[in-house]
Image (cartoon, rainbow, N blue to C red):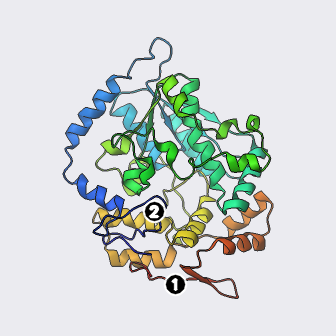
Amino acid sequence: MKYCKRCLQPDTRPNSKFTTDGICPACDYFERLQFVDWQERYEILQDILSRYKGVRASKHRFDCIIGVSGGKDSSRQALWVRDKLGLNPLLACLSYPPEQVTERGTNNISNLIEMGFDVVISMPAPQTWRKLMRVAFDKFTNFGRSTELALFSSVPQLAIHYDIPLILWGENPGLQLGDLKTLGRTGYDGNNLRYMNTLSGGALEWIREAGFELKDLIPYQYPTPEDFDRHGLQIVYLGWFLGDWSLVNNGMYAASAGLEVREDTVANTGDLHGVTSLDEDWVTLNQMIKYYKFGFGRVTDYVNEEIRLGRMSRSTAIELVEQHDDACGDNYIKAFSDYIGLSVDQFWAKVHSSVNRQLFDIHPDGRITRKFKVGVGL
C-alpha cells in the first residue's frame, strides 16, 4: 500500500493507477486543470447543447434528463442547467423504500419540485430490493452492488422511455476519482460509465445465480451499448465544464438554494460537512466497510479534495482520517441489520470476514486496527 505524494489517496482504489512519479489520477488531473481555458470549455458545452436543445420540442418539452437524489451534486446540476444554460431538464429520481430513505432526502426532492422542476420518481419493487441487498451483502459485503445497479440504470432507462437523448451527469469518475475504466473519448463523454466497478463484469450474473429471474430485474438492467446507439443516447459530464466543481462547493451552492444537510456528528458518519448522500444513511456503513477493505473511506475522499484545493494541509488531513475514516454510528448498523434480517453480531462477523488482513489486524475483542500509517502506507 502506497499513498499519493500529494494527497491521501492510496493505490488500493480499484481501477486506479499512479503515475511513475507516484501521483494519483485525481491529483494528476487536478494539476492539468490549472492550465484549462474554462471559457473554451464553456463554448464546447454550448456547441454540444446546440445539437440537442429543442430537438424533441415537437414531441416533448424537455431538453435533457438529469438523475437526482436531492443531494448537493444533483441540486447544483439542476439549478445550473436551468438557470445558467437555459435548458428545461427532466429530473429523474430513483426512490429508496420507506425503511431506507431519510426525511431529509424527501424534503430535498420536495425542494426541487417547489423550485419549479419536473421530477419523475421511480421505485423498484421493495421486497426485491430488500432481498437483493441481503444477497449483495452476503456475497460481497457490499449492499450497494445491487442498489447502485438500479440507481445508475434508472436514468438511461427513463431517457429511452421519454425519448430524451441527452443525459447530463455530474463528475467524471475516471478523472475526478481515478476509476480509469470509465474514461470515454473525451473528458466529458460519459458513455463508458457502464464500465465502472459496480456496473461492469457480468453485473447481473451473480443475481441470476441467486435465483432471481430477469423479469424481476428490469430496474437493475443498464441499457446496452446497442440500446444507447439505437436511441442516440449521450451522457455528458457537467463536472468537466465547471472549474469550481467540488464536494464542498456543490454543498454550499445547493444549501443556499434550500438543501437540508445532515446534522449527525462526524464521529457517527465521517461526513465532515454533512452534505454527502443525504437521501439515506446506510451508505455510512458501506463507507466504513470500504475502509476495512481498501484502507480509505469517506473522510479520505473529503480531505483529498481539500488538499488539492489548498484549503487543508496534509498533516491536518491525516489527523482527520486517523480519527474518522471508519466512522459509523451503531444506530445505522442496527437499522440496516434489522432491514436485511441479520443480527448485529452476524453483521460484524461478515464484516470481519471481509477485512483486508494485509492492511488491518482483528483483535479477539473484535476491534480492528490499522497496520499501515496514514499518509505513509505499509
Q: Is residue 186 left or right of residue 100?
A: left
Task: Mark 1 and mark 2 in contact? Answer it, CB < 8 Å.
Answer: no
Q: In the rendered structure, which amino acid carries the disc numbered 1?
A: Lys
Residue 98 in view (yes/no) = no
Number of the front mark, 1 or 2 = 1
- Give the quadrant of the N terminus: bottom left
Which secondary structure lies at badge 2? loop
Q: At 75% across and 40% down in the image, what residue appears?
A: 125
Which secondary structure lies at badge 1? loop
Task: Give percent across and percent down for residue 203.
Answer: 62, 47
Q: At 29% across and 57% down in the image, what residue appears?
A: 30
**In the displayed structure, would residue 228 be above or below residue 347?**
above
Q: At 75% across and 34% down in the image, what residue appears?
A: 215
The CA distance from mark 1 to mark 2 is: 28 Å
Dot label at residue 371: 1
Q: Is residue 258 left or right of residue 238?
A: right
The residue nearer to you, when weighing 103 against 271, is: 271
Q: In the rendered structure, which amino acid carries the disc numbered 2?
A: His
State which quadrant residue 187 falls in.
Answer: top left
Toward the top, the furthest residue is 58
Q: At 69% across and 56% down in the image, what residue appears?
A: 136
State which quadrant residue 355 falls in.
Answer: bottom right
Residue 193 in view (yes/no) = yes
- Give the quadrant of the C terminus: bottom left
Q: Is residue 25 left or right of residue 214?
A: left
Task: Give percent across and percent down for residue 7.
Answer: 34, 69
Q: Earlier in the sequence, mark 1 or mark 2?
A: 2
Task: Give percent across and percent down for residue 148.
Answer: 60, 48
Task: Give percent across and percent down for residue 139.
Answer: 71, 60
Q: Which residue is mark 2?
A: 273
